[in-house]
Image (cartoon, rainbow, N blue to C red):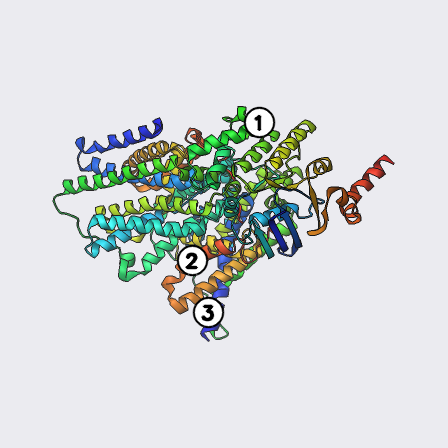
């Protein structure tokens, strides 16, 4: 399998706080990689570092053969890196359609406002928001706004898509629906890196898992193996199981 | 020798600058309002000192005691009755509102006092003394010392008193302060009142040193801007640091490239600081 | 062409007929009306479309006035001088914008306000070029009679207004306008969808400065004499904001109506309260902000209401 994204020894600190330490990961074309770890492990920082929001303090990020360590956010977006936000970031006054059109318009060269809106319709239909196309983004429910984020990300024709907790705050029916969408995307050939807390979803969707803890990579491998890894159990699952056992026992 | 002179002048002037800026910084920090009327408050304070001395033969030291409560009440009411109505509006609205207030106050002062410059001359004059071979007028020294005392008083108030802690709490996290039972509206009014009182007192001190005219208000306001941004918004020590740095830069600048360029230099410095280090020299979040 | 924008162009066309109805006074008011409308339209690009509270209008007005004044003194033809000022203002503002528009909220407001101070002081001190505080005399343009001159400058300012309006309308319907709209609503999300927000904001700032600068140039030639405290008056920065708040932020037609209404009020105040005119102006501003919220009603949710964030 060919590599699409590679991080070598990436570190990032915020005035004293070491958020990422010597992280080396490679992502292969077409896989669905799960990025997990306890709260504050540095997952979102890692995505921000790759996307150029908070560039790496040291280390190198290569994407599709190009060094993107220092590129700006909008440049990364145009190269084919797109993401959804843990906290949804719609253009609140725009309609759902214009939200998605904005993504198509600014990420693709030679796009006009008219063609961008046409494309946007297709993406809205894909995520099941066709009926809400002319509704303003501020009026959508959380689940709809999460799907709107996804439609925006897709409108950018990503080669690599980061999904940052797309399921947080959704009920189980909504989670099932989102999971189905992710399966469809993966089948369509988009490489996906997802940050996810729901182990059920991770085990269901991901082909590989990496685990971050205190900014360091502590495990990398097949889902079934990783969750049995003693270091992972200790850092992450261990606490949860301990709690659960204490509660039930 | 020249260096010592520049340094001592900067020290003296820097404390005064801090005093000019500190009320502005408090209001900006706590209310999140850029208070454009601040400069006119200072000039009004200067007129108060001038009038008290000229007409009632009240020495400026006592004028300080009169000015503080008067300006506090004025500021308190202004906030309660006017500013409070738009306090949650965007910067555009609050800034334009204080600009309107400034137009009124400044126009009123021009109307009553005319635009010409007046000078408060103490009789008998206080003379001057020599510090490290640098001659410093005594009235200037006293003004500087008073400015430091005022700054210290504010620090103590914020640090020690219940109201002070509430002001700091609102500055740090308005929503959390509400949850802790702080009455934000009255804290806003008190903070604005304090800002006005500090401006009034600063004006009294300025009257000892500089000529008085409504036309000088924008210069005071400009100094307050620069000091706030240089030192870091919303802390007493930041205002002191900013004041000293500004005075030093102006002093060195006037010596090297001429006094005409001192103001330009300070504003260029302001813009550079805004862009490169917006948190200021002592950028911290708390207001003590 | 939307109906609102068409209405704007018709309104501007109506203004052009003004010389048919009045003499020198009407022409003077008409020229100032066009100038204010240019201010309001220009400010609206950065303040209304992109949502950045700029107080820099006076800086570029003064810059344009001095640039044109100096060029005219060097016997450059008026049209060349004004176009030169326009281009210089655009480039200067775009360059400054790339740096200053990284700031948000109060910090941007303070920085843009400081630009006015910096420019004024620079002009004040560059005595050789600008005459410093003594001001700058500008050679008479034609001398073919007072009324003919007044008519000429009215149409010059009107023409500039028309160009400004057309450009602003084009921008509002273009990819640039769409992008500025995105930036106002959510700058983080804008970057993330591949929008080069620095470039967009710079262009917006440049556009908001260039017509103001050209208006400054025409103004300088019109009044024959400028000095720093006149053309770098901070009031020139605040007026367009008041006009925009009156007429409705974001809408080109709204801000132009706001400009005309504002001028009307200003004239009434000037005529009746000459000694306390700025105080009365202050009262008007406060009344508008406190008691006339209908001017503010078009403030769509989210617009301008983002928190000051110093990154």
Q: CA distance from mark 1 to mark 2?
A: 53 Å
Camera-nearest residue between A83 and B1: A83
Task: Using the image, name the chain to which the residue with label 2 belongs.
Answer: B
The part of the image, by quadrant, that contains residue C71 is: bottom left
Chain of the residue under label 1: A
Residue B96 percent location from the top left of the image = 43, 41
> Which residue does the numbered mark 1 point to in the structure image?
A128
Secondary structure beneath dot 2 equals helix
Q: Could one spot residue C184 in this view of the protein?
A: yes
Q: Which residue is mark 2?
A: B268
Tell us which disc is closer to us: 3 or 2: 2
Question: In the displayed structure, does residue C268 sit left or right of residue A223?
Answer: left
| Secondary element at tag 1 | loop
Q: Looking at the image, is A249 positioned above or below residue A213?
A: above
Give C17 or B186, whichever is nearer the viewer: C17
Residue, far front: A1
Marks 1 and 2 close (CB-CB < 8 Å)? no
Query: In this rendering, would C126 be left or right of B52?
Result: left
Pointer 3 and pointer 1: residues touching (CB < 8 Å)? no
Where is residue C152? Give x, y as percent.
18, 41
Is mark 3 in CB contact (under 8 Å) with mark 2?
no
Tell me the crowding category of disc 2: few under 14, some 14 to 19, or many 20 or more residues within 10 angstroms, Cα based. some
Judged by depth in the image, the label closer to the viewer, 3 or 1, is 1
**Extreme residue in the top direction:** A131
What residue is shown at x 76% (from left), y 42% (from top)? A224
Q: Secondary structure at mark 3?
A: helix
Q: How many marks?
A: 3
Q: Which residue is found at the position 53% from the left and 47% from the top? A: A76
Q: Residue furthest right?
A: A249
Q: Earlier in the sequence, mark 3 or mark 2?
A: 3
The residue pinned by badge 3 equals B6
């Amino acid at each position: 399998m060919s590599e699409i994204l590679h991080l070598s020894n990436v570190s990032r600190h915020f005035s004293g706080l070491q958020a990422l330490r010597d992280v080396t990961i490679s992502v292969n074309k077409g896989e669905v990689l799960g990025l997990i770890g306890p709260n504050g492990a540095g997952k979102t920082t890692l995505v921000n570092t790759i996307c150029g929001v908070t560039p790496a303090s040291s280390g190198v990020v290569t994407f599709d053969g190009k060094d993107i360590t220092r590129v700006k956010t909008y440049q990364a977006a145009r190269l084919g890196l797109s993401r959804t936000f843990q906290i949804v970031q719609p253009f609140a006054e725009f309609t759902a359609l214009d939200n998605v059109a904005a993504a198509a318009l600014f990420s693709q060269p030679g796009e006009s406002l008219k063609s961008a809106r046409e494309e946007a319709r297709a993406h809205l239909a894909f995520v099941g928001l066709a009926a809400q196309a002319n509704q303003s983004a501020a009026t959508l429910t959380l689940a709809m706004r999460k799907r709107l984020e996804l439609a925006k990300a897709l409108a950018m024709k990503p080669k690599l898509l980061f999904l940052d907790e797309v399921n947080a705050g959704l009920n189980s029916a909504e989670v099932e629906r989102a999971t189905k969408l992710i399966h469809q995307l993966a089948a369509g050939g988009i490489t996906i890196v997802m940050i996810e807390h729901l182990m059920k979803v991770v085990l269901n969707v991901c082909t590989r898992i990496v685990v971050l803890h205190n900014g360091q990579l502590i495990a990398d491998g097949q889902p079934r193996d990783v969750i049995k890894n003693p270091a992972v159990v200790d850092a992450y699952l261990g606490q949860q199981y301990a709690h659960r056992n204490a509660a039930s026992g | 020798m020249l260096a010592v002179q520049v340094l001592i002048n900067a020290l003296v002037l820097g404390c005064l600058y801090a005093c000019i800026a500190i009320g502005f910084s408090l209001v900006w920090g706590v209310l999140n309002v850029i208070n454009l009327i601040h400069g006119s408050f200072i000039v009004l304070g200067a007129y108060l000192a001038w009038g008290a001395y000229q007409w009632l033969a009240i020495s400026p030291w006592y004028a300080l005691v009169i000015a503080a409560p008067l300006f506090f009440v004025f500021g308190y009411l202004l906030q309660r009755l006017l500013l409070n109505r738009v306090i949650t509006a965007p910067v555009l609205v609050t800034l334009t509102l204080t600009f309107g207030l400034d137009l009124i106050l400044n126009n009123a002062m021009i109307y009553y006092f005319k635009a010409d410059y007046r000078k408060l001359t103490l009789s008998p004059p206080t003379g001057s003394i020599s510090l490290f071979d640098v001659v410093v007028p005594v009235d200037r020294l006293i003004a500087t010392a008073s400015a430091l005392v005022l700054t210290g008083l504010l620090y103590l108030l914020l640090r020690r008193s219940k109201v002070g802690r509430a002001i700091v709490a609102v500055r740090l996290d308005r929503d959390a302060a509400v949850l802790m039972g702080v009455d934000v509206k009255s804290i806003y009014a008190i903070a604005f009142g304090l800002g006005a009182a500090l401006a009034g007192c600063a004006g009294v001190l300025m009257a000892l040193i500089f000529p008085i005219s409504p036309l000088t208000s924008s210069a005071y306001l400009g100094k307050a801007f620069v000091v706030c941004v240089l030192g870091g918004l919303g802390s007493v020590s930041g205002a002191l640091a900013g004041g000293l740095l500004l005075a030093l830069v102006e002093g060195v600048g006037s010596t090297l490239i001429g006094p005409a360029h001192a103001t330009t230099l300070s504003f260029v410095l302001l813009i550079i600081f805004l862009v490169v280090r917006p948190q200021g020299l002592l950028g911290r979040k708390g207001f003590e | 062409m939307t109906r609102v924008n068409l209405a704007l162009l018709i309104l501007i066309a109506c203004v052009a007929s003004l010389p048919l109805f009045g003499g020198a006074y009407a022409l003077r008011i008409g020229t100032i009306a066009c100038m204010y409308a240019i201010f309001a339209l220009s400010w609206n690009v950065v303040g209304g479309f992109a949502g950045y509270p700029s107080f820099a209008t006076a800086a570029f007005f003064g810059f344009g006035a001095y640039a044109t004044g100096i060029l005219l003194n060097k016997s450059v033809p008026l049209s060349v001088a004004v176009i030169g000022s326009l281009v210089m203002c655009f480039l200067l503002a775009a360059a400054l914008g790339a740096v200053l528009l990284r700031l948000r909220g109060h910090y941007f407001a303070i920085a843009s306000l400081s630009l006015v101070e910096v420019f004024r002081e620079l002009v004040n001190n560059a005595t050789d070029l600008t005459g410093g505080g003594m001001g700058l005399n500008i050679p008479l343009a034609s001398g073919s009679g007072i009324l003919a001159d007044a008519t000429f400058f009215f149409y010059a300012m009107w023409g500039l207004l028309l160009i400004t309006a057309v450009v602003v309308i084009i921008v509002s319907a273009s990819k640039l306008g769409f992008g500025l709209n995105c930036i106002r609503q959510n700058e983080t999300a804008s970057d993330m969808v591949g929008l080069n927000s620095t470039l967009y904001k710079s262009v917006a700032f440049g556009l908001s400065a260039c017509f103001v600068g050209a208006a400054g140039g025409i103004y300088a030639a019109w009044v024959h004499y400028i000095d720093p405290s006149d053309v770098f008056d901070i009031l020139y920065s605040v007026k367009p904001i008041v006009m925009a708040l009156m007429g409705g932020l974001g809408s080109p037609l709204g801000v132009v109506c706001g400009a005309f209404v504002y001028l009307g009020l200003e004239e009434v105040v000037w005529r009746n309260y000459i000694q306390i005119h700025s105080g009365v102006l202050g009262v008007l501003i406060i009344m508008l902000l406190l008691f006339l919220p209908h001017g503010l009603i078009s403030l769509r949710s989210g617009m301008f209401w983002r928190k000051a964030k110093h990154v």
